[in-house]
Image (tube, rainbow, N blue to C red):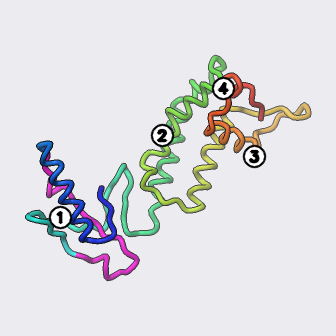
């Protein structure tokens, strides 16, 4: 993917790319290469095909990248909801493993990080998150962490983990400050 602000810069970058790929014996496929103009001005969206050298590239209004549809529309949150649904499916597919008493919390956290979280975040490089979407992702992560860590005991009563306690776990996990043994000792 090439991203530039002007058509002149796009042409320049494309020609450099074409030159370097030809040195490796590769050729850019004209029929598979498309281009899209994003603009807040409606009149700029309806542009024609792009001609660079002897190749013509078709103009599109949207394209698929890493499983996401990238387009000129502002409402593109369907893929994020689908990723969360797929993350739930990935978690429940591994639920027996995660719920096993033979596996430590740190191992369960590792299972979550390697088998579930990548399913949810696949293609996130191209996302622009709204506050609502960011909140939905945080809710999903806290839900899984509550299942991994289970209830905590406070004053002889069992209760689910509070959001502030889960935030501490998330921050500590991201910073890598605790060892596996210390993870298992965390109480929420």
Say which residue appears at 70% left-offset and 32% top-offset.
Answer: 149
- Label 4 or label 1, whichever comes before in sequence order: 1
Task: Locate residue 2, reporting x and y percent.
Answer: 29, 58
User: CB under 8 Å between callouts 1 and 3?
Assistant: no
Residue interval drawn in magenta: 26-47
Position of 118 with respect to 50 (left or right) is right
1 or 3: tag closer to the N-terminus? 1
- The residue at the point 47 percent across, 41 percent down is 119
**C-alpha span from label 3 to label 2:** 24 Å
Please identify, in this view, whether the residue under mark 2 or under mark 1 is nearer the observer. Answer: 1
Establish if 119 lies above or below 101.
Answer: below
Q: For mark 1, what is the residue? A: 57
Horizontal side of residue 15 vs 85, given as left or right: left
| As drawn, 164 above or below 156 | below
Dot 2 crowding, Cα within 10 Å, few <14, some 14–19, many 20+: some
- Which comes before the other along the chain, label 3 or label 2? 2
Q: Indicate which label's residue lies in the foreground, 4 or 1.
A: 4
Tell me: 85 left or right of 173: left
Q: Quadrant of residue 3?
A: bottom left
Residue 118 image label: 2
Q: Residues within 10 Å of mark 4 (few under 14, many from 20)?
A: few
Q: Position of residue 139 (x, y in %)?
A: 63, 49
Cα distance between the residues tagged 4 and 3? 21 Å
Question: Of tags 2 and 4, which is closer to the observer?
Answer: 4
In primary-sequence order, the first of circles 2 and 4 is 2
For mark 4, what is the residue? 179
Q: Which element is circle 2 on?
A: helix
Q: Badge 3 is on which residue?
A: 164
51 or 177: which is nearer to us?
A: 177
SS of the residue at dot 4?
A: loop
From mark 2 to mark 4, how far is it between C-alphas?
A: 22 Å
For numbered disc 3, what is the local secondary structure? helix
């Amino acid at each position: 993917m090439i991203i530039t602000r002007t058509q002149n810069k796009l042409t320049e970058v494309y020609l450099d790319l074409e030159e370097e790929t030809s040195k490796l014996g590769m050729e850019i496929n004209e029929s598979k290469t498309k281009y899209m103009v994003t603009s807040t001005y409606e009149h700029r969206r309806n542009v024609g095909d792009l001609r660079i050298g002897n190749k013509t590239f078709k103009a599109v209004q949207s394209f698929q990248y890493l499983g996401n549809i990238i387009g000129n529309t502002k409402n593109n949150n369907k893929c994020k909801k689908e990723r969360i649904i797929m993350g739930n499916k990935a978690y429940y597919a591994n639920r027996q493993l995660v719920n096993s008493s033979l596996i430590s919390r740190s191992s369960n956290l590792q299972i979550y990080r390697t088998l579930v979280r990548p399913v949810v975040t696949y293609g996130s490089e191209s996302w622009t998150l709204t506050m609502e979407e960011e909140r939905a992702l945080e809710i999903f992560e806290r839900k899984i962490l509550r299942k991994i860590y289970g209830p905590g005991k406070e004053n002889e009563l069992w209760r689910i983990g509070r959001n502030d306690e889960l935030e501490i776990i998330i921050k500590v996990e991201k910073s890598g400050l605790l060892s596996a043994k210390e993870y298992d000792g965390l109480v929420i």
